[in-house]
Each structure stands twice: as C-alpha cells, then as structure tokens.
Image (cartoon, helix red, strand yellow):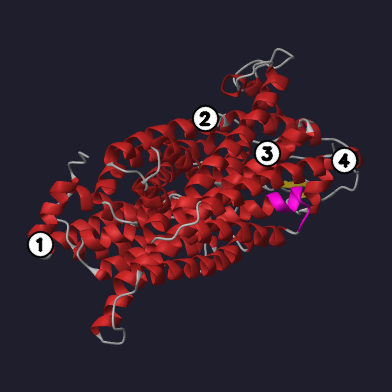
Amino acid sequence: MTLQLSIWIIIGLTFALYIGIAIWSKTNSTSEFYIAGKGVNPVANGMATAADWMSAASFISMAGIISFVGYDGSVYLMGWTGGYVLLALLLAPYLRKFGKFTVPDFIGDRYYSNTARTVAIFCALVVSFTYVAGQMRGVGIVFSRYLEVDINNGVFIGMGIVLFYAILGGMKGITYTQVAQYCVLIFAFMVPAIFLSIQMTGNPIPQLGFGSETQDGVYLLDKLNGLHKELGFSEYTSGEKSKIDVFFITAALMIGTAGLPHVIVRFFTVKKVSDARKSAGWALLFIAILYTTAPAIAVFARTNLIETVSNKNYSDMPSWFKKWEETELLKFNDKNEDGIIQYLGDEKLNELTIDKDIMVMANPEIAQLPNWVIALLAAGALAAALSTAAGLLLVISSSISHDLIKKIISPKLVRRKILKEDISEKGELIAARISAFFAVLLAGYFGINPPDFVAATVALAFGLAAASFFPAIVLGIFYKRMNKEGAISGMIIGISSMLYYMLKFKFGWFGGGNQEDWFIGVSPEGFGTIAMILNFFVSILVSSLTKEPPNQIKKLVENLRIPDE
C-alpha cells in the first residue's frame, strides 16, 4: 500500500470516528453544551483533559524545538508539566466546588462585578485566540504535507471539522471526541518512538533509549554532541539561554497553565469535587506518557536529520526531502553552487533552513519507517491539534454567549425594557453556536498568519493567561480581603503589560526591538511571569486601599476552601 493511500485511509477513518461521536452526542441544553451535563466519568475526563492539554504544541512542536535548541527546550517540559500539577492540586478542586460554567463566571461572581466579568471575558478571548492560532497552524502543516494541499487550505479543512463537532455537541461532543483523539494521538506518538529507539539503540523503551549506546558503542547523546561540534552548533546538552530567561519562561508556562480557561473548565464536567481530583490524577498519568517520550523523539530526530542531509548531494535526497520542500517549511539555498547540502551552525555558510515544526512529522520518513507508521503519525498530529482547538473554541463561544450575552447584555436590555424577558436557554444555545462559528473564522485567520512557530505561539498564550487570570483566581480563593477594585486593576495591568511586550517584540509595534532591548534579558515568552508579579502587586495594593468585599463574598470564599463533596 502506497504512503498516500495509507494516509487517506487512516485519517479518513479517524475523521469518521470524530464525526460519528459528534452526531451521537448532539446536545439540546446549555448545561450539556458548556460542561457536558456534569456527567463525565473521571477516567474519561482525565483522558479528554490530556488530549485538550497535549495540543499541536506538545505533539508537533515541543519535540521539534527541543531537537533544535537541546537543553534550552527543557523549559517547555518543565513549565507545562509543572503547571499542570499546580493547576490540579492548587485550583481545580476549589473551582469545581464553585460550580459555574466558565472562568469569567467565577471572576464575575467572586468579585461581585460585571466590570470584572467583562475584563475576564476580554482576557479569555485574547488567551484563547492566541492559543488557537498555534493549533490551526499545526493543522495546516499536517494537511499541506500529507494530504498535499496548500497550507492555507489545510487550515480551512481543519476549521470545518472542528466547527462541526464543536457546534453540534458542545462540551459533551468535544469531551468524547477528545477521548478518541487521545487514543489516536498517544498511539501515533509512541509507535514511531519505539521503532526509532529499537532502530538506533536496540532498546524498545524510548525514555531509556535516548540515554543508551548506539550500535557503534557510543552513547547517543555523546554522538549528537559530537555531530553538533563538527557542524559549528553549540553542544546539544548545553544551553544558550540565560538562566534568568529560563527561569521566567518556565514560571510563565507553569503559572499560565494554572490560568488557562479551556483546561480549568474541564474540571467542571464531572459530578463532584472528588471526581475532579481523580480526573486530574488520571490526566497527569496520560500526559506523562507523551512528555517523558518527547526528549527521546527530539534526540532521535536530530541525529537522523544530520546524518541524512549534512554534506550530502542534493540530487540524492530522498522523496520526503522534496515533499517538505514543496510546503516551503524546508528550504535549500545552494550558496556555493556545488550541489552539496552544507548544514552548518554559521548562518553565513548554512544552506539549509528547517522549520522547527516539521521535525516530529518528518522523523518517521527520515528513519524510513513503514508507511502505516507515517500515516498514523499524521492522524495523531491532527488529533492533537483539533482536540485543543475544539476546547478553545468552546471557551470563546461560552465567554460570548454565557458571560457576555446572558450575564451582561441581556439583563441590561431587560432593565431598559428593550427586551421583555431574559434570553431563553434555547436562545443562549443558538448564540453559543453562532459565536463558535465566528470564532472559527477568526481562528483560521490567526492560523494562516501566526506570530511564530507553534510552540512559541502557544507559549505566548500561557504568558497572557499567567498575566491575567492566575492572580485573580488564586487571590479569589485564598484571600478574603481581595475585592473587585483590586482584581479589575490587577487584570488590566497584567494583560496590558503582557500585550505591550508581546506586540513590541513579536510584531514590531511600539518601535519594535531585538534581544538586546529585552527587559532584564527576559524574552516575550517569559515576560508573563513579570506581568503576573505586577498583577499581584497592583491587586493587593489597590485592594488594601479600597473598601472590603461584602460579608456574603467572604462567606463564599470560606465555603470554597473546603472542597468536601
């Protein structure tokens, strides 16, 4: 069976499964649309959370960036895994006990203010749209290479699929689709990893394989360090990032994780608080399988790539090289016109440009693995990107329909006697679906015009979440004195400073700048930590200088602290 036929069959079967689940799980109530009727089994919710969590950034880009930057890429591993533990242990049980549909819902009620709710809605939309841009970019990459369509058309196809099951089934449809997607993506990630580990080290366990000896008796990491030295790259196991930037990026990813609205809402879908804790534990186990394998994939991919392309005749390159060239994610510029690929650390002499996002996808082809393994990886990458995109779109649509229309706009129109009564449940459901439709269109635009490669784009979303939501949520749970004035001021300062820094250094706004202009040497991916500290400082300061919250809010906080269901 040819590669192309294998790809079409496997991707077609997985898409048929997702669409079938969407039709089966069609929702007719807002409770099912927003939080799956609070009836999801903890194990299933753990699996769905893992799929939601392991986005295109984890599946496609994380191992890719680790393979290029080596030790410096560990910030993504440390930040994202540590952040999930922080979320699961510190916030999830309390937010589940509160029992609302969304994060802006919590902030609006805890801080007894529609202004706070409005700011939270804005923050949720900014975070979610930034995050979803990375997912749509991942979908476009897979479609452009494996289904041989234009990368922009790939984004459009992905938009259509996500829209179908997000609009039809809401959270219920997304949850059970994500269970299927987790099974697909983890199988797709592990099978090539096991094949490569056996092929390169003889060890079938990838987590052990990348620290083992190769067939020529040299440790794989020592071999890769040697290849890097020969080509003028820095040693793979040494880092170039400053310690302060590593610290701030790791912290931003950790704290941002604990503030991500599409992950938090996952814990609202189970029956009780104890189920929220159980599903968090299951999710951590399911996530660990991929995250402990990613460093091995990175080493295998980097070693195979260098040995395959470096100092080799361009005319002798295998078919995968030409296929990726067609996507323009791999470019060869023969500077000395000798027909030999010079892949070097010196930018002036280097003739090969490789997009970080293709490494995981190209890895099985480079290693000449069977066609069905390559096809499976393509299906897994799509599952990873689509599962997270769907979760994010639900956050966007619920923020607009539930938090903005139902909680703010509709009551205001009733008070002014423009409407006779509040929006009905049916009307809210229609609004949610319309919101999801327009959200998909905007997400598609960001997917076609992303600010960076997938992992970096997602890292910016985490920084925005850290800067905006985390202090408001933590202080809302653990600090009774925290009032609406403090929360509103903090969120505005946090999100504004992060947006300014991101737009300045990623998009060239406000005069632009380069690495030398970074504040105390902190990159845009790490600035979320500084913005979060500003948020905490402003929140506590303003709160201490203004009126205490009402007694019923203090009692609410005391009740929240005992997640005893």
- Residue at 86% over, 35% down: 312
* Amino acid type at image mark 4: Ile
Q: Is residue 147 magenta?
A: yes
* Amino acid type at image mark 3: Leu
In x, y percent, where is residue 7? 75, 43
Taking the image as shown, residue 134 lies to the left or right of residue 273, namely: right
The segment highlighted magenta reads: 142-149
Taking the image as shown, residue 540 lies to the left or right of residue 181, namely: left
From this viewpoint, is residue 397 visible?
yes
Mark 4 vs mark 3: give the one in front.
3
Q: Which residue is mark 1?
A: 550
* Amino acid type at image mark 1: Pro
Q: Earlier in the sequence, mark 2 or mark 3?
A: 2
Mark 2–mark 3 CB contact (< 8 Å): no
- 493 or 4, which lies in front? 4
Q: Which residue is mark 4?
A: 340
In x, y percent, where is residue 315? 92, 41
Q: Under tag 3, what secondary structure? A: helix
